[in-house]
Image: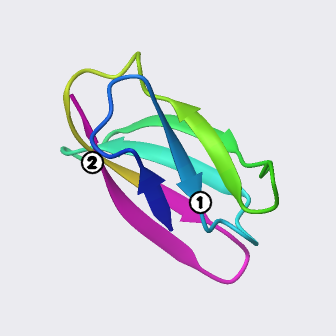
Amino acid sequence: MGIHPNPSSTSVTISGIGGMNLLSVIDISGRTLLTQTVHPQNGHAITLDVSNLAPGTYFVRLTGPRQTVVGKLIVK
């Protein structure tokens, strides 16, 4: 999974999500702030609006039927 640009204050593109169907954004204390079904555009990428998140470090978790992948997101 790739998250670009990172850090960001507006939106990020999350790539490499083939086979994943659920996206969650989790704050540093473990609270899930956002959960949404993933419908990849252009095959394996989506755009996520992060403008409503407070500056800080978050984790992006992608879940599919066979695996879970976690990446770090920094909002400035």
- The colour scheme of the drawn protein is rainbow
**Range of the magenta residues?**
61-76
Side of 27 relative to 21 (left or right):
left
Side of 5 relative to 20 (left or right):
left
Which residue was labeled with disc 2?
30
Q: CA distance from mark 1 to mark 2?
A: 23 Å
Residue nearer the viewer, 3 or 67: 3
Farthest residue in the bottom direction? 66
Q: Residue at x 55, y 52 (%)?
A: 14
Assess disc 2: are there few (<14), some (14-19) or many (≥20) residues with their C-alpha within 10 Å of its C-alpha: few
Q: Quadrant of the C terminus?
A: top left
Residue nearer the viewer, 7 or 37: 7
Secondary element at image label 2: loop
Side of 56 relative to 19 (left or right):
left
Quarter assignment of residue 36: top right
> Residue 55 location in percent, x, y?
20, 25
> Residue 50 location in percent, x, y?
43, 27
Number of marks? 2
Q: Is residue 22 above or below residue 17?
A: above
Which residue was labeled with disc 1?
15
Kind of residue at disc 1: Ser
